[in-house]
Amino acid sequence: MELQALPSRIGQVRRIVSAQLRYWHLDALIDRASLGVTELLSNVHRHAQPDKTCTVEIELLLDRLTVSVRDHDPRMPVVDDPQDIAPLATCGRGLAMVAAMSESWGVRPDGESGKVVWFTLPTTSPAVAAPSRRARHVVQEKPARRFAEVGLAADGLRPEHAPARSAVAG
């Protein structure tokens, strides 16, 4: 998605990234991906010149989620040593946080007038991986119910009680 890296838009992008990760059943990555994309977009807002236009991409490969932000400023970011940052400083820790919470991160030039800053998160950690399948020696497995099925009660005249279901996602 292409956007202006303005504070109001950063919150929208966080919600979009979160919704996409829920759709991919990667709920365990939402907090880290949201933090990372917030930091990268905040850097565009604070530092990018000549404009604040950028593109956010999220890509899911077999075992890895990659989040990248492309802007039109060719200057590469400078990562300060966290020990050199004053304890009460309000900036300077963003890329160090991205590095700490991600599997890997980096920056690369994008043509003559821009760069891409990216980070990856593993999708195969135990908290993220899909539940393992049970062995096939199960005697009988009931098919999954897509919607509540209502059968007839023992007397055959009235419907059985059906569990309540919500149609609201999330």
Image (tube, rainbow, N blue to C red):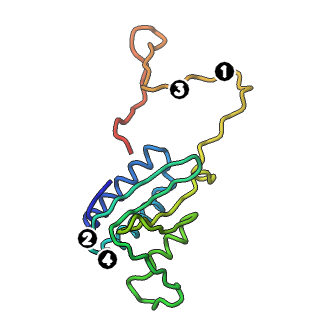
Q: In this view, does 38 lie above or below 128?
A: below
In three-dimensional space, the C-alpha distance between marks 2 and 4, rounded to whole angstroms, equals 11 Å
Q: Which mark is residue 51?
A: 2
| Observer-nearest of 17 and 55 | 55
The three-letter code of the residue at mark 4 reads: Arg
| Observer-nearest of 132 and 156 | 132
Judged left or right of residue 155, residue 42 is left
**CA neighbours of label 1 inside 10 A, class few (<14), some (14 to 19), many (20+):** few
The three-letter code of the residue at mark 1 reads: Gln
Judged left or right of residue 12, residue 126 is right
Q: Earlier in the sequence, mark 4 or mark 3?
A: 4
Q: Where is residue 59 in the image (x, y as percent from the top left)?
A: 47, 51
In three-dimensional space, the C-alpha distance between marks 1 and 2, rounded to whole angstroms, equals 62 Å
Q: Determine whether the residue tagged by mark 2 lies in a helix, strand or loop.
A: loop
Q: Can you identify the residue that label 1 sits on?
A: 140
Q: Determine whether the residue tagged by mark 4 lies in a helix, strand or loop.
A: helix
Judged left or right of residue 102, residue 73 is left
Q: Can you identify the residue that label 4 sits on?
A: 46
Q: Are marks 2 and 3 in contact (CB under 8 Å)?
A: no
In three-dimensional space, the C-alpha distance between marks 2 and 3, rounded to whole angstroms, equals 51 Å
